[in-house]
Every structure is written in structure tokens, then in C-alpha cells.
Image (cartoon, rainbow, N blue to C red):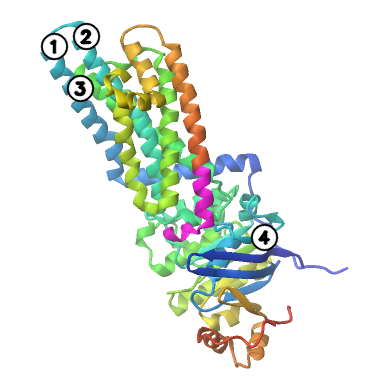
Amino acid sequence: MTTHPAVPARAARVPPRRAARLRVSAVARRHAYVLRRSPHRMFDVTVWPIVDTVLFGSLGVFFARQGGPSGAAQAGVAYLLSGIVLWHVVYQAQIAVSTGFMEETWSRNLLGLMVTPLKELELLAGIAVFGLVKLLMGVGVVALAALGLYAFDVTALGLGLLPVFAVLLLSGWAIALVVVGLILRYGNGAEALAWGIMFVVMPLGGVFYPVEALPVALRPLSELLPTTHAFAAGRALVDGGGMPWGELGLAAAGTLAIAAAALAFLAWMLRLFRRRGYVTRYS
Amino acid sequence: MSDVLRARGLVKAYRRGRAVDGVDLTVRLGERVALLGPNGAGKTTTLLMCLGVVEPDAGTVEIAGHRLPRGRSAAMARVGFAAGYLPLPERLRVREYLRMFGQLYGLADPDGQAQKGLERFGIGRLAQAMGTELSSGQKTLIGVVKATMHDPELLVLDEPTASLDPDVAWRVRTGLADLCEERGTAMLVTSHNMVEVERIAERVVFLSDGRVVADGPPAEVAARFGRDDLEEVFLHLAAGRQAPEHVEGARP
């Protein structure tokens, strides 16, 4: 029998089930450091929310004054302010995930991450988990600005806001998956889409007005977007009626459908990314 | 001795042609192998396919018994990768960077392993430094610490000492050699520094135009090409001359 020299014990590892959670939290923490050390990244969660609140709040106030003290004119202000608060749920959710992914490309960290046990969905989950913190900051700033500057209290809309909030959050993440897929395919040239795509969704997604306010040709497209139905549910809450479960159901079903399509698109782009060796763009 | 890396029939074509054309590559447990060849020979593409980052058009890769791409995550837990061209994210301290990778590798004590790794390479004082404060040599050393802190079975190094001064390059080589000796870690390394390769590797695999043209111990490969050393073999291949034949050297 041969004797082998003693090999020092290998580094201890956590159990596999905990390892996945640890990987997600490692990514989330890494992005927390990035935000803390990049003051300009706070722009998205502080300055833009205030700018949007002032812009749409003041528009609402101006038109309300033109329309006199009628209930309809006053409701317009509330539509605009509740719309901008809820819009920031979609916006912050989307921007946090897509810019979080872009951070890995800007810092050329993608190859380093790809040669670890980290799975693609764990990377996105880690970014999204920290993105929730940014989302709460951004939406909190809009809500506080609306309260402080226009005496509009979004919490007065009640618990019905929560399912609307959840649908919009998932919609934002689904849009982000599409943006990440496009960046994988087309490189950093596609990163302008992270912001640009939101300017397409905003007018078509029923943020401030119902589908009927759009030109006839655009209405079918707007109907297809789940955000249109979620924002309609939000406006129903502003009107003081009960939760329009039909609209919310449409919004939830549509969101699940686009989330599934976005995941499939991302998986396709990821296959192309590996097949064509695009990782060398980032190393 | 069992294989820690087994790649068979790897093929990868890009628009300009075949970058890798039927490469077989095996690294056994504890073995130190250098993958060599002139620029454009297909070394990095081969490495990236072996790491599951680039999908081969044909062929298979197995790491520590895990077949890629399905077993990629489990396989990568056994692999460490460092490259001279991989940067350190700028907005992290060294300690934070190493902790993150330690957690990605599932280490129970990532901070402890990071500190051990830093001390192994004589850079314990850098733990609190920001990525932006490091020289390129220090960044390379940190990259090597990251690649080794989880005690991988296979260490893959792409040009690890490129652009390093001789002193730092020596520390990297010595640290890695000690680690491999102590832990039985296998190593697959690419380098353009043939003197370094002769010091590190017990087997060399030469690629030219995406194919393996020689595989064996350094001295034996040089002899089969009728050259005195690997530098001359490299220059011979880089000059575009054909290798006399596919040379299969005796394996250790």
C-alpha cells in the first residue's frame, strides 16, 4: 500500500441550497457598493423622480386652474400624480436591472462572473434584489414630493395599490430582460435602449390617460400592453371606486405573458452570445 | 491519474474561418500543462470553450466529471480562472472583491480564505485598497488570489504574467507552483513567455491554425521539431512553416 503526502483540507463550502442564496446576495451586495461609491447613480433615484413629479404635478395644476374647480379638473391632477408615482415603479424596476447588468459590462466583469458557479438567472436576481432598494428609494422620493409639493397622498389610495404595484414591478423587470437580451446581442451600442424603451412605453402604456385618449391607430397596441390595464386600475382607485378586478386580471395575465416571452427572448440571446463568442467584447 | 479536464473534438468557426479545428485537450489531476501557439492560433477560444463561456460548434468538454454546458455551474466550482486582461472592478475594495468571489464559489469563510490567499502572494496589506489604487502587477496578483482562494482542482490562466515586471512574475510563478505542489491543483496556462513555460509546465500543447501540432514534455517537443527550446519551436510555427507532422509526445 502506498502512502500519499497529506493534502491540506480544502476550503469549507456551504451546502448547495445555501450556495445559490449566497451567490444572489453576493451580487446584490456588489451593486450596493457600486451605488454607494457612484454618487451620479443616485440621479435616477433622487433627481429624476423629483423632476417628473414637478413636471406632471405642475401640468395638472395648470390645467385644473384652466378648467375651474370642477371635480373632473381636480381629478386630472390626481391622475397625473398617481400616474407618475406608479410609473416610477415600472421605470425604477427596469432601469435598476438593465443598468445593473450594464455595470458588469462597463467594468468588464462579465467574463469573470461567467467562469464562476453563478448562474445567469442568479446574476439577474441579485441585481433585481438590490434594484428593489433603488426602486423603494425612487418611488419613495416621488411619493414624498407629491405629498410635499402638491398635497397628494398616494397612500390614501389604500391597499388596492399593492397588486397594481406588483404587476408594474413585474412589467418593469420583463422590459429589463428584453433590454439585457439586446445588449447581449448588440453590445453596449444597445444600451441607449435602457432609457429609450421607456419613452415608448410611457405614452402607449396608459400611464396618465385611458386607451380612448390615444389616436385610433395606436389603441390596439396600447390594449396589448399590460401596463395600460394596471394604470387603469390605479385610476379607478383614484376615482374612489373599488378595485376593478377585470382590469387587474388582464394586467396580471398580460404581465405573465410578456415576462415569459422576455425570458424566452433572453435565453435565445444568451445562446447567441455564447455561440458567437460575444464575451470577448467585454474582456 | 484521473482527468480534471477532458475536451474532445472542439471546433469553433467565426466568419473569418475556423478558429479551432478539432482540438483534443486533456489535463490530469495535478498536471501542469501549457497551451501555446502564435497569435490567432486558437488558444483563447479553446480556453473559453473549455470554461463554457463560448459554445463549441462541435465537440465536448468535461470538467471534474461535469459535462458542459449542463454541468457548468458545478464544474466552475472546481475551476479558478485568471487572465492578465481581466480588470478589477473599480468601485470595490480588494477585500470586497475577494469576498464577493468567495461567496460566488460558495466558501463558508470567504474573508478568511481571501486573507490566506493575499498572504500567500505577499500582498496582505492590499486588502483595504480600492481597485483604482492598484498597479497592473498588483491587479494581476489579486486576480490570481481570486482564482485560487477556493482551492480549485483546475487552475486556468490566460497570459497570467503578461505586462508584469520580472519580480512580480517570479512571485506569481512561485506562488502558483507552491500551490499546485501543496494542493495537487492542475494548471492549464497560456503564455507567450517560453522561458516561463519551460519553468512551469511539465507538458506543452502547441496550437497552430486552430489545430494541435505538438503535445508532450517541453524538451521532447523541442527535440521533435529539431529545435533547442520552445522559443525556437514557437518562432518556427509563427513563421508559418508547417510542423513536420502531428507530434504526439510521450506523456509523463
Q: Main secondary structure of the magenta part?
A: helix
- Residue A20 is one of the magenta-drawn residues: no
Looking at the image, tell me whether mark 3 or mark 2 is earlier in sequence order: 3
Q: Quadrant of residue B244?
A: bottom right
Q: Quadrant of residue B223?
A: bottom right
Q: Are marks 1 and 3 on the same chain?
A: yes
The residue mark sitting in front, 3 or 2, is 2
Question: For the residue labelled by badge 2, is the local secondary structure a helix, a strand or a loop?
Answer: helix
Residue numbers of the magenta segment: A266-283
Q: Are marks 2 and 4 on the same chain?
A: no
The amino acid sitting under disc 4 is Thr
- B240 relative to A154, above or below: below
Count of marks, rendered view? 4
Looking at the image, tell me whether mark 1 or mark 3 is earlier in sequence order: 3
Instruction: Please give left or right for residue B219 compared with residue B96 in the image.
Output: right
- Please, which chain is the residue tagged with disc 3 on? A
In space, the residues marked 1 and 2 are separated at their CA atoms by 8 Å
Question: For the residue labelled by badge 4, is the local secondary structure a helix, a strand or a loop?
Answer: strand
In space, the residues marked 2 and 4 are separated at their CA atoms by 68 Å
- Where does label 2 land, which residue? A72
In space, the residues marked 3 and 2 are separated at their CA atoms by 16 Å
- Where does label 1 land, which residue? A67
Is disc 1 in contact with disc 2, using a CB cutoff of under 8 Å? Answer: yes
- Where does label 4 land, which residue? B60
The amino acid sitting under disc 1 is Gly
